[in-house]
Image (tube, rainbow, N blue to C red):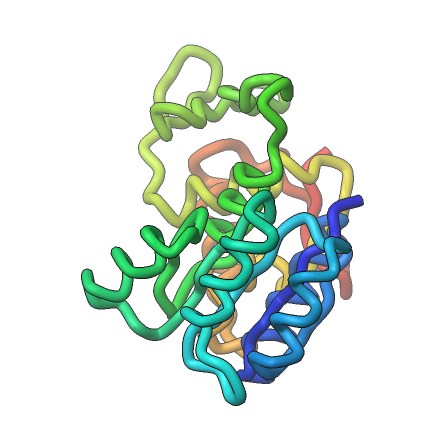
Amino acid sequence: MSRILIVEDEDRISSFLAKGLKAEGFTPTVVTDGVTGLDYALTGEFDLMVLDIGLPGLDGFRILERVSADRPTLPVIVLTARDSVTDTVAALEGGAADYMSKPFKFGELLARVRLRLRSPGDAAPQEDLSVGPVRIDLRRRRAYVGEREVELSARELTLAEVLIRNRGLVLSREQLLSQVWGYDFDPGSNVVDVYIGYLRKKLGARLITTVRGLGYRVD
């Protein structure tokens, strides 16, 4: 089980990340200041680090510089509100494996985490997801029912992908919100229910089961 170090001083974001990564089978550790973050990063106990730039105590770029010199095999994903080209280039040239701007979608971050943790000898990423007559072409981002292509919006496609990847598991509305819409979306919204309705109309009414009081499941 991969251990992920989260160095982020915004409680809302660090809590969101830790909860989401734990639900996906990772072991997250949260640190909220730069000095402690650097100490943890240099222990050699982590497989990947998610690093904010604007940290108290020690700037994220300084941490990146030290990690690149002393722990060059530790992949670092920079996650920050700074989105200028200058900052992006500085992070990547400073040794970051990837760079994402806030606000972000958890599903995209998760894909990048998995990519950076994949060993060279690992199997190639899955290109198709299917359940019954429904098939999603992940590479071309298209959906089919039997041989018929079904037009889905980007959000509908991502929601279908998350549900099918977790086939047999009940996913709560909160889990779906975080993975498909991102941490900054209103948790009281009924948008998940609305989009489940869209998918049932387009992909088949029997595809998604409502588990009362818990969430949704694809069998």
Q: Can residue 103 be seen in this view?
A: yes
Looking at this view, name the residue that lies furthest to the bottom.
Answer: 56
Comparing 93 with 150, the one in front is 93
Reply above or below: 147 against 46: above
Instruction: Tell me the quadrant of the picture where the C terminus can be found.
Output: top right
Observer able to see residue 210:
no
Q: Where is residue 10 in the image (x, y as percent from the top left)?
A: 54, 83
The residue at the far left in this view is: 85
Q: Which residue is drawn at 74% across and 60% down?
A: 43
Percent x, y for residue 177? 54, 63
Q: Is residue 98 above or below residue 186?
A: above
Residue 29 horizontal/vertical position (percent): 73, 67
> Image point 44% across, 27% down: which residue?
138
- Residue at image position (67%, 61%) is 42
Q: Position of residue 143 (x, y in %)?
A: 41, 27
Residue ranking furthest to the right? 1
Q: In this view, does 166 lie to the left or right of 95?
A: right
Residue beneath the point at 55% across and 22% down: 126
> Is residue 219 found left or right of 186 in the rendered image?
right
Question: Which picture quadrant has residue 172?
Answer: bottom right
Among the 4 quarters of the image, the one containing residue 152: top left
